Amino acid sequence: MSKGLFAGVFYLFLFGPLLLLPLTWLKRSRNPQSRFSSAILVLTSISYGYLLLAIPFKAVLLGTDYSDRLFATVNVGTALTFALFCLTAFGKTPTRRLLMASTFAVSVAWFLVGAINTAV
């Protein structure tokens, strides 16, 4: 795989939730939701916001390169959002599929950040 294609796929997965999360919030605002799905959406948004803030402030929010703190933070972010993805499957709200896509996209973004920090 060429570097350009890899970079494009990486940025698509990293910034893809910027499209999915606002759509999920918009659909949620139009339909009354359960507290369960609302809590999942809030936690997913907070997790993704933290990830986006960690891009310019990596050393402060995630830790220095190759540190245990960096890998622990990324692993917790990945596990949390994947657990939220699994929990979303049990909901019966109108936005369940969109919420599942959002939580999975954020989980993949956390995973890719971990993979890149491992490889570089």
Image: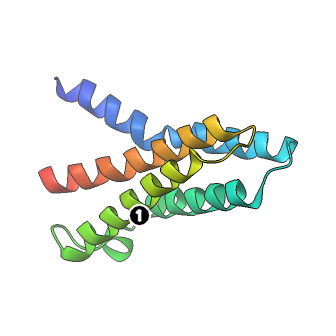
* Mark 1, residue position: 54
46 vs 119, left or right, is: right
Q: Nearer the viewer, residue 75 or 56?
A: 75
22 vs 74, left or right, is: right
User: The residue under label 1 is which amino acid type?
Assistant: Ala
Residue 59 locus on image (x, y percent): 30, 72
Element assignment for label 1: helix
The colour scheme used here is rainbow
Residue 79 locus on image (x, y percent): 38, 60
Look at the image and tell me in which quarter the N terminus lies: top left
Q: Nearer the viewer, residue 54 or 115?
A: 115
Callout count: 1
Residue 111 locus on image (x, y percent): 32, 50
What residue is rendered at 33% in x and 37% in y?
Answer: 10
What residue is rendered at 26% in x and 24% in y?
Answer: 5
Q: What crowding class fits label 1: few (fewer than 14 Cα within 10 Å), some (14-19), or many (20 or more)?
A: some
Whether residue 117 is visible, yes or no, is yes
Whether residue 120 is visible, yes or no, is no
Residue 101 locus on image (x, y percent): 54, 38
What residue is rendered at 30% in x and 47% in y?
Answer: 112
Look at the picture and state if 77 lies above or below 100. below
What residue is rendered at 62% in x and 45% in y?
Answer: 21
